[in-house]
């Protein structure tokens, strides 16, 4: 029997403070986005163009509580999770969505603090 894998790992900067909600059963849910940057070499050009990709995150239970307590706009974080696709309808048009359901989250650096300063402080 073959197994399939759905795992995504990202390191990026938080775009806005987490939106914290609670389900009817009392489970916390956090929603926010992170930005990742990549450099693209344009055909024949010596200069690389920098592009930003935005990723929607959903965190549940303990991770949502961590997000509520510690994660803020501009923080640099590491996340691992699974990619989930969905869609919704607006004005008769079906709009596809993709989001990462986070299973692991680490705060690498708070806004205004570099990752190396964060590591030095932890030592």
Image (cartoon, rainbow, N blue to C red):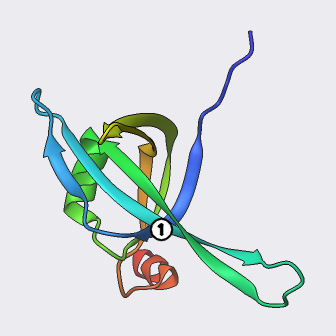
Q: Which of the 4 quarters of the picture holds residue 90?
A: top left
Residue 42 at x, y percent in the picture: 80, 79
The N terminus appears in which quarter of the rendering?
top right
Is residue 83 found left or right of 1 in the rendered image?
A: left
Residue 21: percent from left, percent from top: 15, 46
Residue 20 position, x and y percent, is 18, 51
29 vs 19: above or below:
above
Q: Secondary structure at mark 1?
A: strand
Image side of residue 104 versus residue 31, left or right:
right
**Is 44 or 85 nearer to us in this picture?**
44
On screen, 112 above or below 74?
Answer: below
* Above or below 21: residue 46: below
Tell me if mark 1 has few (under 14), some (14-19) or many (20+) residues whose alpha carbon lies within 10 angstroms of its own. some
Pinpoint residue 80: horizontal percent, then vertical percent: 51, 48
Label 1 sits on residue: 35
Along the horizontal axis of the image, is 24 left or right of 85? left
Residue lying farthest top? 1
**Residue under the point 36% across and 87% down:** 112
Residue at the location (32% across, 57% down)? 32
Viewer-nearest residue: 41 or 94: 94
Measured along the vertical axis of the image, is residue 114 above or below residue 22? below
Q: What residue is drawn where x is 14% and y is 33%?
A: 23
Residue shown at the point (51%, 38%) measured from the top left: 82
Which is nearer the eye, 74 or 40? 40
């Amino acid at each position: 029997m073959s197994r399939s894998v759905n795992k995504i790992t990202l390191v990026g900067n938080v775009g806005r403070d987490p939106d914290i909600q609670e389900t009817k059963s009392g489970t916390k849910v956090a929603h926010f986005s992170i930005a990742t940057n990549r450099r693209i070499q344009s055909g024949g050009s010596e200069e690389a163009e920098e592009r930003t990709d935005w990723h929607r995150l959903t965190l549940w239970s303990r991770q949502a509580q961590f997000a509520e307590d510690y994660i803020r706009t501009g923080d640099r974080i590491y996340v691992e999770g699974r990619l989930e696709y969905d869609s919704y309808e607006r004005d008769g048009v079906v709009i596809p969505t993709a989001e990462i359901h986070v299973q692991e989250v680490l705060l690498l650096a708070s806004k205004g603090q570099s990752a190396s300063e964060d590591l030095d402080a932890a030592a």
